[in-house]
Image: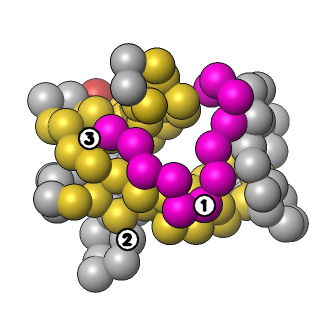
């Protein structure tokens, strides 16, 4: 994670062989790295070293596998140009507003 990001920012999401535009829809909360459980509250702008759960929308849609089904291809990265802004994994399935 570089200098962080905010809700509403647009990035390029890369996952396995997929590359698509991604928009941060919601920052859901911090993740406790020792237990893996989401903590109360949500950061306005996550910064380097913080672990958090976010919801993104993809345009155009892309098929992402969740971590519990296919961990080898669940890894993702958000890019701002050539710079990696955040990296993580897909933890949920897609709905109309969630990917």
Note whether 64 is above or below 49 in the view shown: below
- Alpha carbons under labels 2 and 3: distance apart: 19 Å
- Residue 9 located within the stretch drawn in magenta: yes
- For label 3, the SS is loop
The residue shown at (54%, 30%) is 85
Quadrant in which the C terminus is drawn: bottom left
Magenta span main SS: loop
Task: Give the structural element (helix, strand or loop) at label 2.
Answer: loop
Residue 38 on the magenta segment: no
In the image shown, does 53 or 81 lie closer to the viewer? 81
- The extreme right residue here reads 40
The residue beneath circle 3 is 70
Q: Can residue 36 be spotted in the picture?
A: no
Marks 2 and 1 sit apart, C-alpha to C-alpha, by: 14 Å
**Residue identifier under label 1:** 7
Nearer-the-camera pick, 61 or 11: 11
Residue under circle 2?
98
In the displayed structure image, the side of residue 50 where residue 17 appears, left or right: left
Q: Which residues are magenta?
A: 1-12
| Horizontal relation, residue 94 to residue 45: left or right | left
Q: Is residue 48 above or below residue 61?
A: above
Q: Which mark is residue 54?
A: none
């Amino acid at each position: 994670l570089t200098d962080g990001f905010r809700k509403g920012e647009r990035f390029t999401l890369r996952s396995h062989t997929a590359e698509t535009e991604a928009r941060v829809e919601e920052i859901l909360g911090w993740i406790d790295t020792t237990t893996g459980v989401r903590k109360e509250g949500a950061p306005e702008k996550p910064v380097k070293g913080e672990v958090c759960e976010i919801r993104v929308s993809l345009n155009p849609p892309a098929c992402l596998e969740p971590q519990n089904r296919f961990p080898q291809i669940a890894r993702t990265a958000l890019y701002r140009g050539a710079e990696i802004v955040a990296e993580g994994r897909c933890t949920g399935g897609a709905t109309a507003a969630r990917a």
